[in-house]
Image: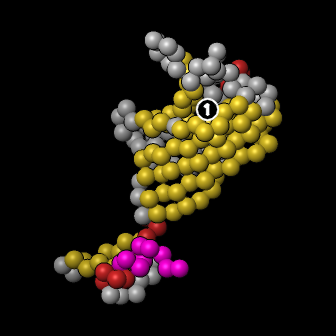
């Protein structure tokens, strides 16, 4: 099956296209590489405190990029938290978040086990400006959020999440 964007451009221009589109503007030739628009791939996420990682029995990360929009899906399963202590974070995203003042992108969690929710509070995650990691927090009733601490996790657990964000 033909690539949708290539088929659409072929239909529009009447030319067979390869992986580059050449444009002439007043004698100045420019090319646009389709890789600038989209890509898919895999990466290996890690979870811990940013210095000390949990021991993972499974870790998978998938991403799709369309322009500057990145969509990521992650699953990590750990069998030990080791010496991790501090704010829980997931590191290794394929691209940094946008380098924009006060930029935030929220996480959607689809499966969580082994993380202390301090009495059933909701866990949230977010990526901030110009970083390649997600930090996790607990939503407190009628007060500000609090950090999820890596040392309070169970010795085994699983975290599934997805996030869409603007790349730097």
Identity of the residue drawn at 31% across and 75% down? 30
Judge the density around disc 1: few (<14), some (14-19), many (≥20) Cα neighbours within 10 Å.
many
68, above or below 2, in the image = above
Q: Nearer the viewer, residue 15 or 8?
A: 8
Q: Is residue 65 above or below residue 2?
A: above
Q: Residue at x 64, y 50 (%)?
A: 61
Magenta part of the chain:
1-9
The answer to whether residue 8 is magenta is: yes
- Horizontal and vertical percent for residue 59? 71, 46
133 inside magenta stretch: no
Q: Is residue 82 visible?
A: no
Residue 116 visible within the image? yes
Taking the spot 52% from the left edge, 15% from the top edge, the residue there is 140
Q: Residue at x 37, y 71 (%)?
A: 32
Give the image quarter of residue 119.
top right
Q: Is residue 159 left or right of residue 1?
A: right
Q: Quadrant of residue 40?
A: bottom right
The answer to which quarter of the image holds residue 123 is top right
The reply, left or right, for residue 96 in relation to residue 17 is: right
Q: Nearer the viewer, residue 30 or 10?
A: 10
């Amino acid at each position: 099956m033909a690539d949708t964007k290539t088929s659409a451009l072929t239909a529009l221009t009447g030319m067979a296209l390869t992986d580059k589109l050449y444009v002439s503007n007043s004698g100045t030739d420019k090319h646009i590489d389709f890789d600038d628009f989209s890509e898919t791939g895999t990466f290996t996420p890690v979870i811990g405190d940013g210095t000390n990682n949990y021991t993972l029995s499974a870790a998978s990360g998938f991403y799709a990029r369309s322009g500057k929009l990145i969509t990521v899906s992650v699953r990590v399963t750990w069998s030990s938290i080791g010496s991790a202590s501090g704010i829980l974070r997931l590191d290794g995203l394929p691209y940094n978040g946008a380098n924009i003042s006060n930029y935030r992108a929220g996480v959607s969690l689809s499966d969580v086990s082994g993380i202390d929710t301090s009495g059933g509070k909701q866990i949230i995650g977010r990526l901030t400006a110009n970083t390649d990691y997600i930090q996790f927090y607990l939503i407190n009733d009628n007060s500000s959020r609090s950090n999820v601490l890596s040392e309070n996790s169970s010795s085994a657990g699983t975290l599934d999440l997805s996030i869409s964000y603007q790349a730097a």
